[in-house]
């Protein structure tokens, strides 16, 4: 399995790509740190413990519990969550990235 994650920021005109090749599952998984929540999600996805849909849900949860969002009022947190889920469901680029995780 190959996982390719592309992202970037239109604000500072950057683009980044992460490729994770699973030639040796144990070696690939151990290269990521369990202390990092995003790495933990990638580990679980590569190890087959979670589906791509569950991985996306975990990443949304991590987003809501980090940065300034974690201290936002509940109504604003719910709005951010709805916006993230709507973007994931409707944006063709995001949908193609997620389908690439399967």
Image: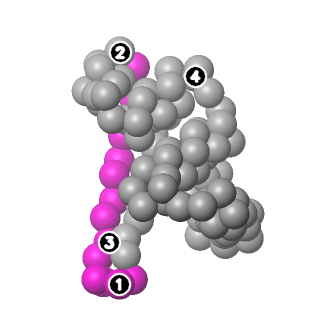
10 Å neighbourhood of mark 4: few (<14), some, or many (≥20)?
Answer: few
In the image, what residue occupies the spot 40% across and 36% down? 37
Q: Earlier in the sequence, mark 2 or mark 3?
A: 3
In the image, what residue occupies the spot 57% across and 45% down? 61
Label annotation for residue 48? 4
Chain part drawn in magenta: 10-25
* Residue at which label 1 appears: 11
Q: Quadrant of residue 34?
A: top left
Q: Quadrant of residue 14?
A: bottom left
10 Å neighbourhood of mark 1: few (<14), some, or many (≥20)?
Answer: few
Mark 1–mark 2 Cα distance, whole angstroms, equals: 37 Å
Q: Earlier in the sequence, mark 1 or mark 2?
A: 1
Mark 1–mark 3 Cα distance, whole angstroms, equals: 11 Å
- Find out whether residue 17 is within the magenta segment: yes
* Residue at which label 2 appears: 26
10 Å neighbourhood of mark 2: few (<14), some, or many (≥20)?
Answer: few
- Asked whether the viewer can see residue 28, the reply is no
Q: Earlier in the sequence, mark 2 or mark 4?
A: 2
Residue 15 drawn above or below residue 65: below
Residue 100 drawn above or below residue 91: above
Position of residue 100 in the picture relative to residue 14 (left or right): right
* Residue at which label 3 appears: 15
10 Å neighbourhood of mark 3: few (<14), some, or many (≥20)?
Answer: few
- Find out whether residue 45 is within the magenta segment: no
Helix or strand or loop: what does disc 2 sit on?
helix
Asked whether the residues under the numbered discs 3 and 4 touch, taking CB atoms below 8 Å apart as contact, a structural biologist would say no
Q: Position of residue 62 (x, y in %)?
A: 50, 45
Q: Position of residue 20 (x, y in %)?
A: 36, 40
**Which residue is nearer to you in this view: 63 or 87?**
63
- Asked whether the viewer can see residue 11, the reply is yes
In the image, what residue occupies the spot 65% across and 37% down? 54
Helix or strand or loop: what does disc 1 sit on?
loop
């Amino acid at each position: 399995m190959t996982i390719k994650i592309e992202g970037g920021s239109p604000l500072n005109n950057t683009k980044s790509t992460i490729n994770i090749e699973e030639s040796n599952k144990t070696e690939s998984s151990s290269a990521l740190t369990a202390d990092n929540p995003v790495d933990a999600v990638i580990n679980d996805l590569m190890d087959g413990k979670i589906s791509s849909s569950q991985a996306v849900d975990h990443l949304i949860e991590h987003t809501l519990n980090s940065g300034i969002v974690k201290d936002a009022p509940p109504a604003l947190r719910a709005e951010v969550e709805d916006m993230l889920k709507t973007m994931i469901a409707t944006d063709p680029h995001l949908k193609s990235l997620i389908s690439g995780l399967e």
